[in-house]
Amino acid sequence: MQNTVHFILQGKGGIGKTLVSTILAQWMKTRVSDTVRCYDTDQENTTFSRYRAMNVKHVPVMTDARTIDPKRFDALMVDLLESDGNCVIDNGANTFSPLMAYLIENDAFALLEESGRHVYIHTIVGGGDTLHDTASGFVSTAQSTSAPIILWQNEHFGLLQTPSGKLFAESSTFHDFSARVRGQVRLALRNSDTFGADIKKMNTARMTLDEVLASDKFNVMEKQRIKTVYRDIFDQLDTVQW
């Protein structure tokens, strides 16, 4: 797994894009290569760039007038193309549409592939009340590019179940693009008073798994639960057809 570029794309805010970015980058650093280049294009909620251990580069793509500057997207592309290695790009809801428009208009995915980069699109579908909007985002993203897709199923908001009772992965919406899906990762709903509180504490502190395990701010059971969550997700990422 070399020279890969991973875009985290979903138009709905608050669905877990930064969480996916941080987990993916940590998995790559543990399983693939010690060096992972991380980028944060979110203009307003620069959460990913606050994880100091990941050395995330913030790429502000909006001007002071709150308009999109395509030349700043150019700078991101140049950065991706000039250096070898694996890259993770977190994208905010406010820049989703402009980034997709830029990537399509400039045929950026093809340029990356022609330059020896393997592109993957990571998109998140949430359960409960978020299912309709995030499923629409999944379709929009899949229709916009031919790049392979990694589907993250976030159960934090509830099960990914359609009004007819079908799971999202059994629905016609998913079936229409299933051939493009290289892998699925389930962010399982766990006890919010234990697992949920521990992960929240970790994310609020902007800490990586390694930092948590070395910290005296987490007790032994908190560390054990966080390790359990990460081990589950890492094992799922190991099965993806990269």
Image: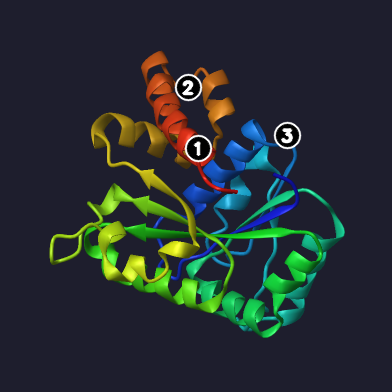
Percent across and percent down for residue 211 are 58, 27
**Mark 1 sits on what residue?**
205
- In percent of the image, x 51 and y 73: which residue is there? 94
Classify 10 Å Cα crowding around label 3: few (below 14), some (14-19), many (20 and above). few
**Mark 3 sits on what residue?**
34
Percent across and percent down for residue 51 are 60, 43
Q: Nearer the viewer, mark 3 or mark 1?
A: 3
Amino acid, disc 3: Asp
The quarter of the picture where residue 210 lies is top right
Percent across and percent down for residue 171 are 26, 65
Q: Which mark is residue 217?
A: 2
The answer to whether 228 appears left or right of 1 in the picture is: left
Q: Nearer the viewer, mark 3 or mark 2?
A: 3
Distance from the alpha carbon under mark 3 to that under mark 1: 22 Å
Please determine whether, in this image, residue 104 is positioned above or below residue 51. Answer: below
Q: Earlier in the sequence, mark 2 or mark 1?
A: 1
Please determine whether, in this image, residue 102 is positioned above or below residue 198. Answer: below
- In percent of the image, x 59 and y 38: which residue is there? 26
Classify 10 Å Cα crowding around label 2: few (below 14), some (14-19), many (20 and above). few
